[in-house]
Image (cartoon, rainbow, N blue to C red):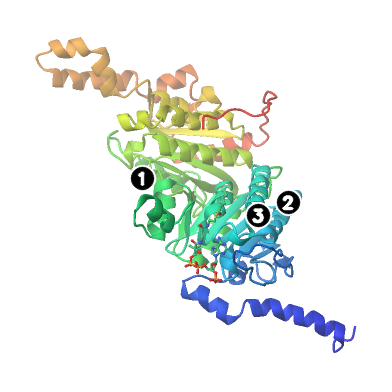
Amino acid sequence: MDTNGKLFKKFLERENKISDQFSSENAKKQHAKGKLTARERIDLLFDKDTFEEIDAFVTPATITSKFGKITESYGDGVIVGHGKISGRLVFNYAQDFTVMGGSLGTVHAQKIAKIQKMALKMGAPIIGLIDSGGARIQEGIASLAGYATIFKNNINSSGVIPQISVIMGPAAGGAVYSPALTDFIFMTNKTSYMFVTGPSVVKEVLNEDVTDDELGGAMVHCKKSGVAQMMFEDEEQTLQGVRKLLTYMPSNNMENPPVILNPDEIPEFNEKVRDIVPDDPNKPYDVKEVINQIVDPNTFYETSENFAQNIVVGFARLNGNTIGIVANQPKVLAGTIDINSSIKGARFIRFCDAFNIPLLTLEDVPGFLPGVDQEHMGIIRNGAKMLYAYTEANVPKITVILRKSYGGAYIVMNSKNIGGDFNFAWPTAEIAVMGPDGAVAIIYKRDLAASDDPVTLKKELVKTYRDEIANPYIADEKGYIDEVIDPAITRKKLIVAFEALQNKHVATPAKKHGNIPL
Ligand code: HXC
């Protein structure tokens, strides 16, 4: 072809129009807000020079509405395509706020829907970079229909390919519900926010003054509402966080996660683990110390770190293989299970189960959190979520009881009878219907009331209860746990046990779907 000829010049002119659209003027507007452009984000997210864009030249729909005009653009405010992350195929769409506020019109929606369908067909993860004012007002009902198609695709892909949403600016109106239907939501502190209706509507309807950040900033959603799982301080760190999370996942539900061996020498006998749980059962400790001493070094990737901190969830590697960890956190609310921690745990367990990620449970739980608030807000319905999720999950499931394992919480945390494959306990474990104080108060109520020295009597009875009942040996003798182990060999035990479970297959009864208590 003659590269100085008319045909080639026309081709180059079109190419230049795309780069003009990402002119320094538009980039400046984004940078002034502490944000990157859609193309800069894609460059950071994907392995160098691997991103392939499609539909770059599509133009917005022509609309006849007299309300507002549609800005002429190539691409209609969203870049879609595929590339490689750590060498693996990933699909992506990235909204461009500089084109009509990243709002979603007919063509914009068609592009996203097309890439969603491709990702599902190819069995590869999809990542949405969201920076959008929601449904494009000028295109009216067509925008709503576009969102509906995207939501439907999200739901069809749920449990088949990992779906990740990264909020990188506003996500308003319809823009929030696609992320809400995906597996993980990332946010950047101070520059991203999500709300169904923004501060101006809140002011109009409720006469309340609130800023974007106060209403739906990263802190709000990662700490209070639990809508988002991950928060980082700038966009680059956020995108690095997404890349890292993907290393723990398979590309789809028919595959296993990649095996990534750790080059470090890791001791199989680790005496440090013996010293983490204090002898005094009322003393708190940080369960993350236990996790970090058991898994491959520096592989623990915590999700939902700031929400419901009485339970810790996240991914890690054990001998190079991804596992999902659910651990009670004794240093927050004594590790009790409340509504939020049950929801957090259940959602994480269901993700792991959908994507063939074995589950490790580290248990130290005195029970469900009591109280009027919890009861009235539905701890019964919500607490049942984690019970349901654990029981339903048929990936390999192992529990290690570190210390307390009382009552309903004993059952919930992957006990043998709900399907734990291997259940181990440390010598510090206390497994019983309830804690010593409660048990003594109920069983010896009359004796304590009649005693001249109820304090000493109670102390003695508590000791007897601990010696006779609240220890791991009765459960061991009756087969409710498989073995009491030395904490120092926990890592080795888990590696061998997960290896033994790698071909686990469970036949489930035919049904349309279960009815998890929502
Ligand atoms: C069309 C929009 C738009 C929208 C923003 N723009 N949102 N155009 N439809 N939904 C345009 C603006 O007109 C402006 O165009 C440009 O994008 C940048 O917007 P600004 O307001 O100047 O930016 P900023 O001050 O940063 O504010 C961003 C914003 C605000 C917070 C997102 O624009 C906003 O509140 N937008 C509306 C959000 C909203 O209520 N969406 C819900 C839609 S209804 P120019 O030409 O001036 O540059 C919906 C229902 C779906 O989504 C429900 C499904 C379940």
Rendered residue at 54%/38% (across/down): 349
User: 373 or 404: which is nearer to us?
Assistant: 373
> The N terminus lies in which quarter of the figure?
bottom right
**Three-letter residue code for mark 1:** Asp
Q: What residue type is labelled 2?
A: Lys
Q: Does the residue labelled 2 lie within 8 Å of ligand 1?
A: no
Q: Is residue 382 above or below residue 288?
A: above
Which residue, given by chain and number where applicable, does mark 3 sit on? 126
User: In percent of the image, x 15 and y 20: which residue is there?
Assistant: 456
Secondary structure at badge 2 equals helix
Asked if labels 3 and 1 touch by Cβ distance under 8 angstroms, the answer is no
| Earlier sequence position, callout 1 versus callout 2 | 2
Instruction: Tell me the tag on residue 117.
Output: 2
Q: Distance between the Cα atoms at labels 2 and 3?
A: 10 Å
Label 2 or label 3, whichever lies nearer to me, is 2
Q: Earlier in the sequence, mark 1 or mark 3?
A: 3
Q: In which quarter of the image is residue 378?
A: top left
| Residue that label 1 marks | 286
Task: Please report whichever mark, 2 or 3, sits nearer to the chain's N-terminal start.
Answer: 2
